[in-house]
Each structure stands twice: as structure tokens, then as C-alpha cells.
Image (cartoon, grey):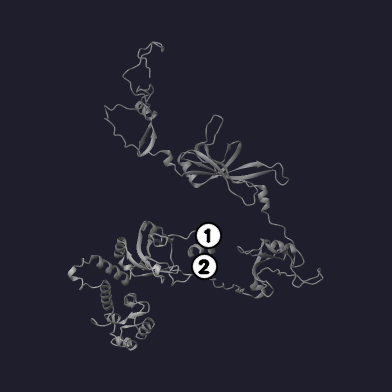
Amino acid sequence: MVSNPVHGLPFLPGSSFRDPTKTAFHRSQTLGYRNGYAVVRRPTVGIGGDRLPVNQLSQAELDELANKAPVLTYGQPKQAPPAEFIPAHVAFDKKVLKFDAYFQEDVPMSPEEHYRIRQVNIYYYLEDDSMSVMEPVVENSGILQGKLIKRQRLAKNDQGDHYHWKDLNRGINITIYGRTFRLVDCDRFTQVFLESQGIELNPPEKMALDPYTELRKQPLRKYVTPSDFDQLKQFLTFDKQVLRFYAIWDDTDSMFGECRNYIIHYYLMDDTVEIREVHERNDGRDPFPLLMNRQRMPKVLVENAKNFPQCVLEISDQEYYKEKFGISDLPRIDVSKKEPPPVKQELPPYNGYGLVEDSAQNCFVLIPKAPKKDVMKMLMDDNKVLRYLAALDSPIPEDKDRRFVFSYFLASDMISIFEPPVRNSGIIGGKYLGRTKVVKPSSSVENPIYYGPTDFFIGAVIEVFGHRFIILDTDDYVLKYMESNAAQYSPEALLSIQNRVQKREAPAPELENKQTKEDPGEQELEALIDTIQKQLKHHPCKDNIREAFQIYDKEASGYVDKEMFFKICDSLHLPVDDSLIKELIRVCSHGEDKINYSNFVRAFSNGPG
């Protein structure tokens, strides 16, 4: 900012000087707060900090200085506490002045009325001196009513002045946008407010009425007819009165007939009947609303159409079924039908392509979607694979030495089989089975049961699409998985893992103890017998089990046929379906058709056999 401290010099280049000490050229703050409310204050300095050459005292302060009496005689007077400051938009919030008014509107194109009186309500909002004009809605007036002038500050004259609450009073005219409104009255709050501000209110006036509206309120002409039955009387008395009945059309006796619902309307004004259709969603019918149009319906159809009896409702002063027909209550007839039991959805036979769940999606929706997957399981068991070594259980001699690697994927419960290639074996190795779910042979096609991780253990027999495999060994991760999830596995599976760990931890045999070394099969047998004896500790001792087997063992060889073995077990009610008993039978098997019953009987004795 350039200042000229030397008075008398013209404000021209070279005659003005810049003050190097001034560094701030911002505008002064004009917003302040009093008692928590925002107020505007006058700036005392201009840009650059120069004091403004205007009087900074308000008019009230100037008047106080002019009328200030000397304080030498009476001393300094005590100042009254300042009044609490409240801005106008807070003090007058939601305080509105309401005036009842009307204006006259010309009707040039009507032979029945020349002008129209329209009554309105004028609202004055004290918080911001805005006004609005609302016209109450009158039914069937044919005029767009409601908000005539939206809330705004209304101009009072051409000089730009606006209406103030001091300009409003009863019994005066105000002009808004070229339309003159007559204020006739106000509400109680408006009267109290204006009187408190020292305004003398004019007496209230009577609201002007619309002549055409008053003409429509006159009573209708009355007719005196010699007969009690008069069509005009019936029309005027029962106009817009309709009886409604709910009916059905039972057409089930005819071919392809059905029971359909209808609504019957009886119009009292002219004794006409209308039958309406009742449509339901997806009923497959065209959307015709009426079965029979509104017309007078005969009771009996005859050829003479002029003198046929009609279906009418007699007219009386009190039209009720109770007084006319003596019926106090019309009973309702229950025509509802019981819904048939839901049809069980049956899936077609499985065709063998893909998984059963994927094929079943074609029967549920038109556009099949993939079955939902267990996302949490996929995230928890991602990249977790259980691997097993298995042999093919086949009568073909060439298949005895074939070995396969089973991979069980925990994330998707799928199985893949790989056959390591062996040189000069004559069999091409590689992928034996791609990743897929394998169904147990004992499950049905409708409810397939797939192999799970608990079905794989050493000695288990896995049947894959007609081929039987025997699990021979597992990797270390399977052992850790079974130890951490021991509750999910059967005792037979845990026993097989225990035997495998014992074989691994067994010390290397010494040369002098070769003859006294126990066979691993005998160790497995002894451990299995000990486990069964602990499990069947409270089972009643069967002393006659050995005698029953010896009866059929004529040669005293200690072996019996499998068929005879199971018949003897069934007669003795032995739990051959138990998983441990099944494992014991497998260990005691000798060849394909013999079983060593001597070792089998030891598991059911109270002590060592």
C-alpha cells in the first residue's frame, strides 16, 4: 500500500512514498462472538493497519457521551449489568405471524360467475423477515391450490424496500406481485406480538365469501311424487353405494373345469350388477377385468325381453338386511381348498458324467450354476495334501508288484492316483486317475458318500471305480495330521499308525538275537488283541467260543473256512462289524478262504490264550 505522509503533495508518481515498515496488508477480522452467538463488528483499521478515518462509536455511545452529567458532585454512577445478547435469528426462530386474507380474481369466460373470491393465509417469518402465501385446498374446486408464493422477502415498492412486520395490520390492503390482498384477521400470537411492539391493531373484518361456492351449497330441489318408487329418488339416495359379494364359479364337473373366484357388485342407484374377475399371479389367463359388464340382470332368462323379471333390491328408508329380510348376520361359506402336499422333487438317474452335485444343478434351474464350495475350508486347508502308498488288490500276477501313490487334497476332498514308472515292467506308469471325488461303493447314487481323510490308514481297502487298493504306508505329514486330529479317526486307524511308529522306532536287530526276534506281524497281532481285550473288558466271557470252532475243525489244524467262520460268529453274537474286530479278522486271515481261529479266540478270553 502506498501512503503519502506529506500533506499538500499530489498523488502522482514521484510524489508518493512507500512505508518500508509495513509488512501486513490483510483485511481486519469483522466476525466476533458474544455469549456464544456470531455477531458482526465494525473494523477499526484498514488494509496495512492504518486507522480508518470514520467514527468508531455507535449512535448509542454518542448519545451517552452527549448526555453524560459531571461526576464530580455525585461520583461515578454504577453501571447496570449488560443484558444478555441474543441474535434475531435465534430469538425469533420458528416464530411466525399469520394473517387471514383474500383476493379477488376476475372470471371473464363464465356465464355463472364474474369474479371469484380466493381465501389465503399470509405467513410472516420473524427470523429473516420473509413471507409466504398459502391457499387452503378446497375439494373439487378445479383450481391449482396450495403454495401461491414461496417463502421469500417480498418487495414493497419500486425503490427496493421490503415488507416489514410493522407494515402489516388488520383491515389493510397489501400488493404482492401486482395482486392486492385484503388482510381481515390474524391469530392470537400475531395479535399479542404486534400489541407488545406498540402497534395498534385495527378491528377484525369478516372474511369475504365466494358467491359461486355459496351457490353450490344451497340444498337441492325436492320432488314430491305420488309413488314411493322413484328413479330420481333412488339415484339421489343411493348414489355411490355399492354392495359387494365374493362368489365362486364351480365348474369342476365339466371337462377341464375349475373353481374360480369372482367379485359381484350390486349398484343400488340403478339396480345393475357387475361381475369382476379375480386374477392371481401366474394364472395363465388374459387380464380381462370383467366377466360381465354392468347391466340389469334377469332372475330367469325368457324369450320376452320386455317383460322379464329383474334382479332388484327394494328401496326403503332404512336399507339393511336385518330390517328387510330379518337376517342379522350373513354367514360366510368356506370355499377354500386345502393345498396339496408338496411334491417331492426327484432327480433323474445319474448318468455317470461329472460329479453328482454338478449334474443335479441342471434339474434345479434353467441356467445351472456351480455348487457352493466351503470357502473357509479351502482357505484353511489350501496346499495341504495327504499322500499314501498303496498296492493293487488283483488276482492277476502282474499286478502284485505295482505300487501307487494316493494324494488326498484336504481343501477339495479330491483324490488323484499316480503310478511311478518301473523300467522293464511292461506297464506304462504316470497318472492313473485325475483329481476327482471318489464315491464309496456302499453309498447310493442319490446320496453319494465320498471318501474322506478318516478312511485312509495303513491296511485300509479303498475301492476306486471297481479297482481295490490296499494302503501300505504313509508319509510323515499324514502321521502328524492324524496325531493332531486323533478324535476324527477310528481306533483301527490309530492302531495302524501306532504299529508303524513302533516299527520305525524299533532298534536294529543284533546278530545274536536273530532267532529270538519277534515277527512284526506277531507284534501287530499282540497289540491288536490287547486293545480288543481292554475295549471288551466288561463283555461277558465266551468260554465256548473255542469249542464251537473246534467242532467244525475236524483235522485240528486251527483253521476254518471264511463262510463257516462268519456263521459261527453270527450264532455266538460276536461284534464282527466293529472296526477292531474287522482288523483282527484281516490279520488272522490265511490265504483267501481260511482264518486262524486260534489267534482270534485269544481276544475274547480274560487272560492270555
Of the residues shown, which amino acid type is indicated by label 2? Answer: Tyr
The residue sitting at 46% across, 69% down in the picture is 447
In the rendered structure, which disc, 2 or 1, sits on the residue that comes first in sequence?
2
Q: Quadrant of residue 465?
A: bottom left
The residue to which callout 2 is attached is 350
Judge left or right: residue 131 versus residue 320: left
Placement of 474 over or under 76, stated as above or below: below
x, y percentage for residue 409? Answer: 38, 60
- From the viewer's side, name the closer residue of 560 and 41: 560
Of the residues shown, which amino acid type is indicated by label 1? Answer: Pro
The residue sitting at 20% across, 67% down in the picture is 509
Q: How many marks?
A: 2
Mark 2 residue element: loop
- From the viewer's side, name the closer residue of 214 and 284: 284
Are the two marked residues, 2 and 1, in contact with CB atoms closer than 8 angstroms?
Answer: no
Judge left or right: residue 589 versus residue 325: left
Image quarter where the N terminus lies is top left
The residue to which callout 1 is attached is 368
